[in-house]
Image (cartoon, rainbow, N blue to C red):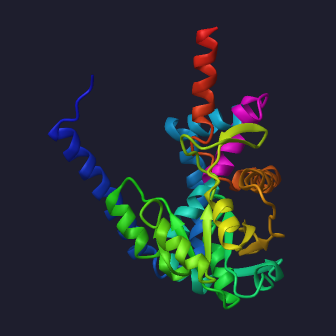
Amino acid sequence: MSYVTDRDKWLTRATEWVMYASAWTFRYLTWPLNTWTLTRMFAPLGGWLAWKLPYARDRIIENVDHVWPGLDDTEKEVFVRANGAQTMCLFIEYSRLDKVLREIAIEVDGEEHLRERERGKGAIIVTAHFANWEAIRFAAKSMGCECGIIYRAFNNRYLDRFTLDLIPAAGEPVLQKGTGMRGLFAHVRRGGVVMILVDQRNSGAPFLDFLGKPAETVVAAAELAHRTGAALIPAVAHRDLKDRRFRVTFEEPVTGDEPIAMMQAVNDRLSAWVQETPDQWFWLHRRWRTTERSQTLEEDAA
């Protein structure tokens, strides 16, 4: 049995505060610089850190081995460094999200899927932790379509506060998973638009295929679309560092009468994005952890 001491709590709180202070310091010191300049400067550092820090390197490789076994050590290093570079870009963009809105160029494809939904009906945009998903809400806002978001709070209470000060720049309302579900339903039912990231593991959710492996997948987005008549629209943003722009694609809405089947169709779309540009997905998540644990238990029982 383990116990959390007062010293452990103090160290955790102190570490969280240092991370929060570092985020504000970075934002303040780099504010005069253009965001694209910063990402080009710091992306290689992100790749180096991802490879040198065991926590990041081992987590990324664990996930990649689970999905695509057989990569050699050189291929894994190249992949980890590329993914770390993209993750660094994301952190920089989030630290100055209110400024990014004024600096980034966005190329939009498939905007008709968002504009031409059934009159008076809302829309649920489903996406993944891919490149910078906030570019999708920027794109919607530029089209005159305010897009809210439902998000999972950070474990670090200070960073959560930091982020909450910035997220509304891309659109409102900003709703929190759990406590914000009632507000989410009301917003969509009134014809509002909201974005939900659906690629994180949630214990107890149905197992659906994701990148060829069973993964617990929450079906709430499809259920909400089914109940309200809202359009369920997959959307993705690709970061193009070379041309200093994001390419946002609103795909054809997913339809159907069975929420689970609808979410499997969504997972298929997400899988295609990752297959196309794997380094831009956030591989640090423990997407398949429950699957691996269940398989281990079954092997032990046998």
Q: Where is residue 132 in the image (x, y as percent from the top left)?
A: 63, 66
Looking at the image, can residue 11 be seen?
yes
Span highlighted in magenta in the image: 66-84
Q: Residue at x 23, y 45 (%)?
A: 11
* Residue lying at 78% horizontally and 80% vertically, measured from the top left: 107
Q: How many marks?
A: 0
Q: Relative to 182, is 291 above or below? A: above
Extreme-bottom residue of the structure? 144
Question: In the displayed structure, does residue 291 sit left or right of residue 248?
Answer: left
Q: Residue 263 sits in which quadrant?
A: bottom right
* The C terminus, quarter of image: top right
Taking the spot 65% from the left edge, 37% from the top edge, the residue there is 63
Magenta-span inclusion, residue 238? no
The residue closer to the viewer here, 184 or 70, is 184
Secondary structure mostly seen in the magenta stretch: helix
Q: In which quarter of the image is residue 205?
A: top right
Residue 13 image position (x, y, % from top left): 25, 51
Residue at left offset 80%, top offset 54%: 265
| Rendered image quadrant of residue 300 | top right
The residue nearer to you, when weighing 170 against 56, is 170
Position of residue 284 measured from the top left corner of the image (x, y, whole percent)? 57, 45
> Is residue 34 visible to the viewer in this orientation of the structure?
no
Quadrant of the snapshot with the N terminus: top left
> Outermost residue toward the left?
6
Q: Which residue lies furthest to the top in this view?
A: 302
Q: Residue 79, position in %: x, y?
A: 71, 44
